[in-house]
Image (spheres, coloured by chain):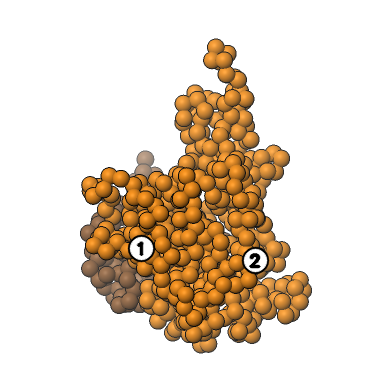
Amino acid sequence: MNTSNGAVIASSSSNVPDVADLVFDDRVHSRIFTDPEIFNLEIERIFKRTWQFALHESEIPNAGDFKTFELALEPVIAVRGKDDSIKILVNRCRHRGMQVCEQRSGNASRFQCWYHGWNYALDGSLLSEVDQATGMTQDDLGLGQLPRVDNYRGFVFASFAESGPSLEEHLGETRRFFDIMLDYSPTGRVRVDPKVVHRVKYDGNWKQVGMDGYHVHFVHRSVVDIFSSRKEGTTGSAVGALHMEDPWSDASSSRARGFPYGHAALDLLEQRMAHADDYLEEVENSPGGHIYLEKMTAIHGRDKAKEMIAMHGDPHLGVFPNLQLIHDHLRVVVPISASHTEVHMYPIMLEDVPAEFNTARLRHHEDFYGPASFGSPDDAEIFERTQNGLMAEVDPWIMVNRGLGGEGEQHESDGTTTGNISAEVTQRAQFAEWRRLMLQH
Amino acid sequence: MTAQTTVDSMTDTAVSPQQRSDLEDFVVLEAGLADSGRYEEWLGLWAEGDIEYWVPCNSDDGNPASSIAIIYDDRVHMEERIARMVHRFAHTFTGEDRHQRVVGSLQFAQQADEFIVRSTFILGSLHRGQQKVWFGRSIHRLIQTAEGRFRMRAKKVMLLNNDEALPNILFLP
């Protein structure tokens, strides 16, 4: 078992505990956050089975564009082919295993391994001659690739598993939340730049990130205080998105929402729409905002445009296991070990808006997100201290029962479950899917 | 060969020895105030009028209009930053952290009314029992007040690892 500074101490049990005993509706065992063997099982049963977010298609727009990263700890290359398709290739030479592509992103006509010079085409097929004496042919030795790659309106997902629910089935009702972010852009498309990203890391487990409506008043209290003195007409619970009333209060119309397949959302939409006129005025007076409003009104009509401006294009959605769409960015959760995680936050640029409108989004993003921002460092700090606390096994159960079965809990007709914003509906949804996948073997 | 042709093009011999000494004292003072948490005094080292505090992200250059930064502060945002670093509910800042940097490789130049100081640093940052080491280089743009004091008009800090995954930045770069 690893401590937070990397030292290894002997585990009290050499057996992997039965996963079925570790997750219940109202509580989960802390070992699922701290045990390296469970982490390895998660890689096999969750990350190598279900749909994972890979990248946004706008990161590799042209033939030959590529980006390298890790999925389920494996090095991969996302590449745009000459036929305009996107493939997720395994970044490992079929000869002796060398990583074929070294750059983080760029454009290439082919991939060359620098060990023995083997060349691969953009679709992964081997171009180099194979020694006839081996009895193998080029067809035997193309780069591995993830068998399923699919796309929802530009968000590219991939799966290591050859079969399973379709992406459409997997995303389900979350798609209308994706739509909220996408339709905030006049063209319905957004742009992500692989070279414009905040990457942060913390010594804690990947399952800690995001979708918690309960923590904001406490963890982000300093930000609430500071933002309060910023502008008239906001309560200071702005926390990165200017709010006209406190959306993190159970008295508000905000809802914590859980979906099938482990997705979760902090649904602030209704609460925002109640203040649509204020949001409209705020955008009208912002840099480039007047032109943006004109475009949106021309496309959607005044009423619909007002609704969309109120929602700010912020779905506040977590797509299990590794994607979150929050405020002005898309966030990728990268599990590295049971006690180490990276989080990559890519600002979302809108298409066909004045440049200064996008620039303002960048500055708002920096306010709350990033290693020297006012918001996310407090989250990372809390995650690290939690990882320390979880080393204590005197009572190993983590409570996720807030709001369970209470008055505020509702089962909606669309298959989602909602509760007050501070209810742990979101955690319960995530752990239900965790349990489902971990028990399949 | 004259002395000027052997001088590094980034150092301007028009900056006098006394000015070089005073500029170095300023940069060392600024680093010391930042590292010892004397943030209000550090704020006092900035010039009046428009100022810029920039710690780029992903590359040492880039355009803040189209890319994000680790820090990109004007005065208002800088004052908010300091307010947060001393805020009793900003959990990241425990009040027990220790920071210490070494500033070196100083080079001096003068352009119009500004003195430019380029320097490098190694910084140790201690937080909850873990010590992390940071590297970077800085560009200070300073003006001189009527009383002859130096004040910062702009500071740009290029962290060596600004394109890598970063832990919380608990010091003032």
Q: Which residue is mark 1?
A: A383
In percent of width and height, residue A227 lies at: 45, 80
Identify whether A101 is placed above or below A374. above
> In the rendered image, which quarter is residue A199 located in?
bottom left
Among numbered discs 2 and 1, the one appearing first in the sequence:
2
Q: Which amino acid is tagged 1?
A: Phe
> In the rendered image, which quarter is residue A276 located in?
bottom right
**B56 and A325: which one is in front?**
A325
In percent of width and height, residue A134 lies at: 54, 15
Please name the color used to draw chain B: brown
Q: Residues within 10 Å of mark 2 (few under 14, many from 20)?
A: few
Nearest-to-viewer mark from 2 and 1: 2
Q: Which amino acid is tagged 2?
A: Arg
Q: Residues within 10 Å of mark 1 (few under 14, many from 20)?
A: many
**A384 and A257: which one is in front?**
A257
- In the rendered image, what is the letter of the chain coloured orange? A
Q: How many tags in the picture?
A: 2
Evaluate whether residue B113 shows in this view.
Answer: no
Q: Which residue is mark 2?
A: A176
Identify whether A329 is placed above or below A409. above
Evaluate whether residue A124 shows in this view.
Answer: yes
